[in-house]
Amino acid sequence: MPVTGVVGSGRARSFLGAFFRIRPLALVLAALFVLATATATADAPVGSVVYGRVKGQDVRLSMPPTDSPVGIAVFFHGQNGGVDNRMDEPWLQSLVQAGWIVAASDFHTDSWGNEASTADTENLLAWAEQETGGVPVRLWVSGSMGGAVSVNAMVHGNVAEPPCWYGVKPALDLTKMQNVPGGPRIIREAYGGDVPFDRNPVNVVDDLPTQTRYRMVTSPDDTWVRESENTGRVAAALQQRGADVSVLTVSGTHDDPSHFDIDDLLSFAASCANAEPQADPA
């Protein structure tokens, strides 16, 4: 019915008046809804996710929306983490957006680089190769405890040595974790006692591959994983052996957001795009 046919009604006038009084607010709310939706879409994970389970551990691949991925980047989570740790956050999602497949595992959760976590690494790499049809693993990325997990996998695992290794606040001296909440107790539980000498990464630097390029992110304000006892010590030892090692110094405590520098991660990853894994020397 045309509007002119009802405007004589007081009820209609009241309804229309209320409508036009409310309409500006409705338009504002609608605009905010559209903006929020656009923002959520922009920040949402891209591509697709493939889950699996290998020998009791959940495994995952974040797949980029491309038929020609750059390569596989393996993420080694920190203490209390799991297969999804940081995988849907902007830091690792930036790799997916750049065309990388990002692989992850539970790694027996709080493993601190024990033998089980090394087997988990072998299993994850084999599964990822099968799922992707042989896309090469070009980059390992680790956070905190994941530094120990990844280094011990390189030294003790039957795996191809990664062309590139990116460690964020890497925990590399397991005897110096007294300030990590629950650290000493959890480490003892992971190993069933004291950490074996050759499972403490600072003791096996001479066994790390020098053809791998290393990038470390550390803060002098980190009181949990101290720079001098971890990144500083291992970086210096690798450089003495002729390895390509660089360090990004950031600020703040162990969980400060400055550690997760997207531009730095993407820049290092781009430099690894054409690198080929090295066969396990063993």
Image (cartoon, rainbow, N blue to C red):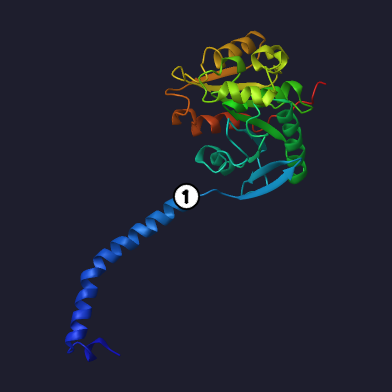
Q: Quadrant of the C terminus?
A: top right
Q: Quadrant of the N terminus?
A: bottom left
Can residue 260 be seen in this snapshot?
yes
Can residue 113 be seen in this snapshot?
no
Count of marks overlaid on the render: 1
32 versus 179 height, above or below: below
Quarter location, residue 83: top right
Q: Position of residue 221 (x, y in %)?
A: 43, 19
Q: Position of residue 8 (x, y in %)?
A: 17, 89
34 versus 53 height, above or below: below
34 versus 131 height, above or below: below
Residue at the disc numbered 1: 42
Q: Residues within 10 Å of mark 1 (few under 14, many from 20)?
A: few
234 horizontally vs 25: left or right: right
* Residue nearest the viewer, comparing 113 with 65: 113
SS state under label 1: helix
Q: Position of residue 79 (x, y in %)?
A: 58, 30
Residue drawn at the location 45% of the way across and 52% of the way down: 40
Q: Position of residue 102 (x, y in %)?
A: 63, 40
Quarter location, residue 251: top left
Residue closest to the far top: 240
* Residue nearest the viewer, comparing 199 with 31: 199
Residue closest to the far right: 282
Residue drawn at the location 58% of the way across and 25% of the way down: 167
Name the kind of residue labelled 1 in the image: Ala
Residue drawn at the location 75% of the way across and 42% of the way down: 54
52 versus 203 height, above or below: below
168 horizontally vs 39: left or right: right
